[in-house]
Structures are given as C-alpha cells and as structure tokens.
Amino acid sequence: MDGPKSINRSEAAKRRWHRHRMAIILRAREEFRIAIADPLFSAGIALYWGEGDRGPCNPLRLSNTDGRMIGTYSLFLRTFMQVPMEKIRIGLVLYPDLSDSQCRAFWASVAGVPTGNFMKTQYIDGKHPTKRLPYGICMVVVNSRAAKLKMLTWIDIFAKRYTIVPCAGIV
C-alpha cells in the first residue's frame, strides 16, 4: 500500500515521535534542575557517562564488575529514572568455572532486584586458567527509548555544566 496515504501516515508518525521526544527532553531538563543537588543523581549520571552504552538506539545498559557501582546505579534507576523493578533486567557474563546460581544470588542482592529479572547468562572462555572476576560481569539493562533519551539529555547538561575544557564528543 505505497502511495500518498502511507507517506502521510509515515510523516504523521515522525511528527508524533518528534513531539514526544521534545516533551521527554523538556521534562528531563526540569528534572535535572531539581535533582542535581542530590549526590545520588550526580553519581548515577557520572556512572552512566563513564560506564554506560551511549549509542542512541541501544538500550540503557551499564556493565561492570564492581558490586558497589551496580548497586548505586540500580538505586539511581529506581529513584530518579523511576524505572519499575520489573523493567530492570540483569545480564551476566561469566567464566565457565563460576557458579551461575551463586553469581545470580550475589548480583540480585547487590542490584536489589529479584532473580526473575535475570536474562540468560553468557559464558566466555578466558585466557587465564583461574577465575579473575569472582562474580563475573554484570549488565544492568532497561529497554526504554524514553529513558535512554532522558539519560543522554542529563549527561549533556551535566557535561556542559561541569566540564572545564571543551572537547569533541557526543552532542
């Protein structure tokens, strides 16, 4: 069904998404202004800026091996991004000699999410014969274009406010 009607629908959908996107950005700017005084807010932005996946089409995803970082970031997601518990997904990357159940229990406790939120564990072959990471790598994932846009907006504002030397980067 190609023709003028399909073009009009496509253009209408693009306009709706643009309006929705602009509303998210405006709301994010206002939330930033209010929340920036809270150290957890600043920490969450900085953690994602340093360790998160910034590709605009990728999910909101942060990976690390430090339980303190994962716990802080998970609390940030629930507190400031208002991500419902069931929307926070956890992925693990483990070496074959690590126990999946023990690692899941550790990361569930650290992230404050139930083990039902875990995705299928990925295994990697390491070059070293013994485990170097006692609990593997944890990925905290939120599949939301709106949350990703909000985070990228917050990072942009944060960078403009606190970066001393301007440099090339994501705009």
Image (cartoon, rainbow, N blue to C red):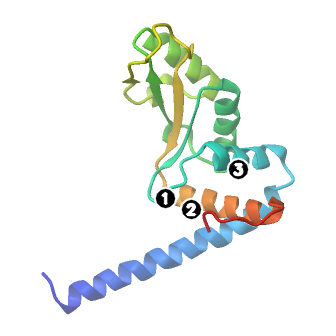
Give coordinates of residue 156: x percent, y percent. Answer: 68, 64
- Pointer 1: what residue? 145
Q: Who is closer to the viewer here, 155 or 85? A: 155
Disc 3 marks a residue whose amino acid type is: Ile
Circle nearer the N terminus (3, 1): 3
Instruction: State the residue position of label 3.
Output: 45
Q: Position of residue 91 (x, y in %)?
A: 46, 31
Circle 1: residue type: Arg
Give the residue drawn at x 49%, y 56%: 55
Label 2 sits on what residue type? Leu
Question: Mark 2–mark 1 contact, CB under 8 Å?
Answer: yes
Res. 149 mark: 2
User: The C terminus lies in which quarter of the figure?
Assistant: bottom right
Whole-number angstrom distance, CA of label 3 to CA of label 2: 13 Å
* Residue 55 - label: none
Q: Nearer the viewer, residue 49 or 21?
A: 49
Label 1 environment density (alpha carbons within 10 Å; few <14, some 14–19, many ≥20):
some
Given this view, does label 3 or label 1 mark the residue nearer the observer?
Answer: 3
